[in-house]
Image (tube, rainbow, N blue to C red):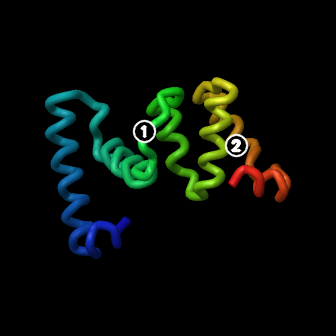
Amino acid sequence: MVEAQGGESRAQYGDNLIKKWAIAFTHDYGKNYSARELRQMRQFYSIFLKWCSVNTALSWSHYRYLLSIKNENERNYYINQVILNSLSVRELRSLIKSKAYDRLSYADKKTLN
């Protein structure tokens, strides 16, 4: 993320901006605009930027939970599971904790790509 922001000094400047915006947004719109929430929104944008549109079957809570998954194939697997099985956030969390993707065979993972 630091490289995408143009180096360490620019990243620190961006982090300071997020803190300032968090204070302003929290004052104007409520507690859902904390610095942590704004960083997650920025992370969401950088991860899902390549998608033409975001799937409306997933809520922001689904996406927030999926942000922690670094492996794109694994993340896409869980997204597809939510869509195909209409999983709630709680069910998604349980599926991820059970490491469903890791338990797939190599052949199954290959067909997902």
For badge 2, the amino acid type reads Lys
Up-down relation of residue 45 to residue 14 (above or below): above
Which element carries disc 1, helix, strand or loop? loop
Would you call the spot at circle 2 few (<14 residues within 10 Å), some (14-19), or many (20 or more)?
few
Residue, x 45% and y 37% (percent of image)? 54
For the point 61% across and 25% down, which residue is it?
Answer: 88
Label 1 environment density (alpha carbons within 10 Å; few <14, some 14–19, many ≥20):
few
- Front-most of residues 24 and 83: 83
- Tell me which residue sits at (83%, 58%) in the image: 106
Residue 94 - label: none
User: What is the number of the mark on residue 97?
Assistant: 2
Q: Position of residue 58 (x, y in %)?
A: 52, 30
Q: Which residue is mark 1?
A: 53
Q: Amino acid at mark 1?
A: Ser
On the image, the x and y values in percent for residue 33 come to 27, 37
In this view, 53 is above or below 9: above
Left or right of 58? Residue 81 is right
Residue 62 rendering spot, x and y as whole percentages = 52, 34
The image quadrant that residue 66 belongs to is top right
Does residue 69 lie above or below 4 as drawn?
A: above
